[in-house]
Amino acid sequence: MDAIGLIHRVWEALSRGDTTTLELTLAPDAKWRAVEDGPWNCENRAMILRVMGRNLAEGRGGRIEDAFRVREQVVVAFRPTRHAPVAWPLDGELRYVVVTIREGLITEMKGCSDRAAALEYAEALAA
């Protein structure tokens, strides 16, 4: 399965409250980094799954509006189902995350403040 297809499959499962697909696609050393790095970053698979499960239980999910490749990364633009303005900024109505996939597994998810920051981050990883 291609990287964009993998992202859609994971997001669709999450929208049903199913974290199993995410669990199966996370690399052993996967990380989930916020827009601003801090102690809230998820530094391992277990933490990612715990936080994602809690977010879904609290109704914090989203629908993919666009997903496209920037070299080896996938930039995902998604519309959150619920938004807390102080938690993570929106660019228009969307949030952005850059997903790195290696050998069919998600190794990193990085929240970005807007589309321009997502493109910049993805390009920097490719350099």
Image: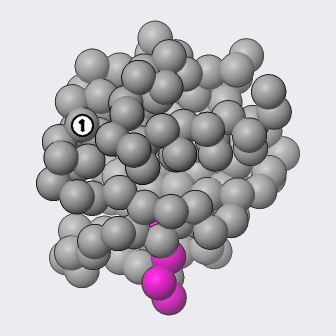
Farthest-out residue, front: 16
According to the picture, the residue beneath numbered tag 1 turns out to be: 53
Q: Within the image, what quadrant is residue 65 found in? A: bottom right
Residue range of the region highlighted in magenta in the rendering: 92-96
Residue 61 placed where, x, y %? 35, 57
Answer with left or right where residue 22 lies relative to residue 43. right
Q: Within the image, what quadrant is residue 23 found in? A: top left
Residue at figure coordinates x 50%, y 88% from the top left: 92
Farthest-out residue, bottom: 92
Residue 16 placed where, x, y %? 39, 44
Residue 105 placed where, x, y %? 62, 21
By secondary structure, the bulk of the magenta-drawn segment is best described as loop
Between residues 79 and 105, which one lies in front from this camera angle?
A: 79
Residue at figure coordinates x 27%, y 19% from the top left: 46
Q: Is residue 29 magenta?
A: no
Residue 38 placed where, x, y %? 23, 47
Answer with left or right where residue 94 lies relative to residue 57. right
